[in-house]
Amino acid sequence: MTGLGAIKGVNKALLGRLGKLGIFEPDDLLLHLPLRYVDETRITPIRDLRPGEAAQVEGEIIHAETQYRPRKALICQLQDVDGGLLHLRFLHFYPSQVAALKPGAHIRAFGEPRPGFFGMEMVHPQCRPVRENVPLSEALTPVYPTTAGLTQPSLRKLVDWALHNADISETLPAGILEELHLPGFAESLKFLHRPPPDARLDALQEHAHAAWRRLAFDELLAQQLSMRRHHARRRTQGAPRLQAQHRLTSALLERLPFALTGAQQKVWAEISSDLAQPHPMQRLLQGDVGSGKTIVSALAAVQAIENGWQAAIMAPTEILAEQHYRKMLDWLSPLGVSIAWLSGTQARTARSEVLAKVASGEAQLAVGTHALFQEQVQFARLGLAVVDEQHRFGVHQRLALRQKGTQPHQLMMSATPIPRTLAMSYYADLDVSVIDELPPGRTPIATKVVSEERREEVLGRVRDACLQGRQAYWVCPLIEESEALQLKTALETFEQLTAALPGIGIGLVHGRMKPAEKQAVMQAFGANEIQLLVATTVIEVGVDVPNASLMVIEHAERMGLSQLHQLRGRVGRGSAQSVCILLYAAPLSQTARARLKIIYENTDGFEIARADLALRGPGEFLGIRQSGVPLLKIADLERDADLLDLARNIAERLLRDDPPAAEVHLKRWLRRAEEYVKV
Ligand code: ADP
Ligand code: MG
């Protein structure tokens, strides 16, 4: 195969521009698909033009003038053979355009007509001169994504070259292709790059056409094949077999003040049996906020420990890690488990003492923040690593806790439910367990959406709740642009509330506090020494204070849906009726309104996540847009959900029945596909 450099007229500068579009090889040109199409296959009489419907007209310029008021503009009048008149208006133009659009010039103009001051007009139509009887285009004209210095005609030429010179052979075995009822690869590519004039423009634009679906399928299939290969590769690595001994795990269960829910029992059984396998588990434990994932992770840790191995539990924030540490102390010390606490604020000597215990194996469980574990903590025998609130780290930052010989099992936990389509695609190399039931005795949370103007009323509710012995959170607005401003707002809110609510103990936590200070405030809140906790979104994850039954979120319209759901999940953990008040500042944008409506109407995290995904798209949802991990380019998980199902089945069958065919397919897409996961 020849490289791009071999194409006539392609120089270094052009290669650079192509590179910006992600085009490095002839294959990439093939898969550089049009954004949209324009129909230049026909001429529309000017009198048949309809506002908003793009069309091509042809005629003679009968008048042209440059106006200077209200702003500089070139205005031409075009007349077609039927006598229809149309104004063409240009706000930016070059002398060459003025010359080309002189009276007497015969041109074709393509653009979107709209009613103007002088009748129908087109603003900035694409114009080209025509001599008599120049044939119309035979195909719909593709419009490609491009970059500065690369024109549509040159891109079209390059794609033409690729269609003739690059490899467009079929990768799917004939039997499978037949079963799919989708067109062939070459046929689909030709159709999308050069659609025939009778192609339905709307279907093409909507990606509903079979040719689009074929390419989307190919992309999804490559992703599935790549994910499954990762999954299979993991099975060739060794991990300690941590068999269920029912010694410490049973002792822990007996000591608990509650019984596991059915859902907890089910996921625990799945995890327990994974741990007994001789290859590393990579399981994602999903469960809505408050569903009780922590105890499941404690059970898993204890199964590792009762087999003579160590376990580690990591959390994204110091507050959350500390809370886990306390829970583990409470649950596991009575069983004689020795627990090490790795904190960012530990004195150097204390820290090295802890590290020594971890390295010698004396510490059976280590708890700390994720960051702490990234700095080369040496374990004597690490059997299991638990990562809490995994979504915070991004999908593709899965832990690289490698050790010589065997690999530790990994349990990732997330309260941001992953919609099915995402779980099947970006997470397809993981095994997933779901806790789909909340512990009994929870009272549903009532959500209220309240305008900022009714702040006084809200303050009154907070006062009443606190005076009646309950506790409340007050979440300060998120200010993404500036951390300093966010801090300022938090301090001001704290002062205002302190002034407005005399006699109520009020604490403040924000991102800039030292971990020890945060911990002191959290502890005081946990012990009900403080009734109202003013916080920035640091309390987003994992904080567990059952007596807190009221939450106020300021400027809720600025927050993402999952974030709101997580925050709201901090209340409703005890027996008191809980309320979450979403304060918003009017006027609301349309998306903000849509978001608040979803959170108001739904309490199920999965429903909310699905809506969030639809609103934000997978890149934002997964937090990988900026990470350089390529997202699916052609397929859309919602629109092509049926293809995703198909791709999954076919991937499984190909790998089982026809591995060489799988290789051929991956080879075409691999440069993309292998990036889908980095484990
Ligand atoms: P999350 O899944 O959000 O991490 P947690 O593990 O923090 O939830 O659990 C939330 C609360 O529910 C904790 O106070 C925990 O002790 C309690 N809990 C967990 N499982 C049960 C259960 N089966 N019955 C009653 N309470 C439970
Ligand atoms: Mg949790």
Image (cartoon, helix red, strand yellow):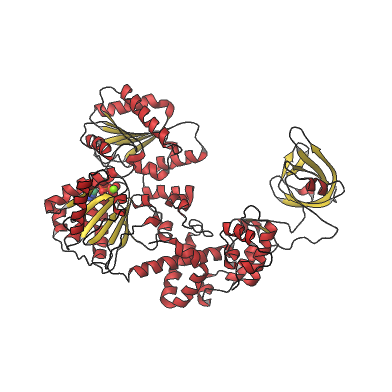
Count numbered badges in the picture: 0
- 204 over 77 or under it: above or below: below
Residue at image coords 32%, 48%: 316
Q: Which image quarter: residue 235?
A: bottom left
Would residue 656 be seen by someone viewing this image from the given angle?
yes
The reply, left or right, for residue 541 in relation to residue 305 is right
> Percent from the top left, x then y, of residue 218?
52, 67
Question: Where's residue 599, x and y in %?
Answer: 41, 41
Residue 197 image position (x, y, % from top left): 71, 62
Say whether residue 438 is visible: no
Left or right of 132 in this view: 410: left
Question: Which quadrant holds the C terminus?
Answer: bottom left
- Compared with 392, 658 (above or below) is below
**Residue projecting furthest to the right:** 104
At 46% from the left edge and 49% from the top edge, which residue is drawn?
A: 620
Q: Position of residue 302 (x, y in %)?
A: 19, 57
Q: Which one is in front, 260 or 325?
A: 325
Judging depth in this view, the residue of 564 and 580 nearest the camera is: 564
Q: Is residue 396 left or right of residue 38?
A: left
Residue projecting furthest to the front: 349
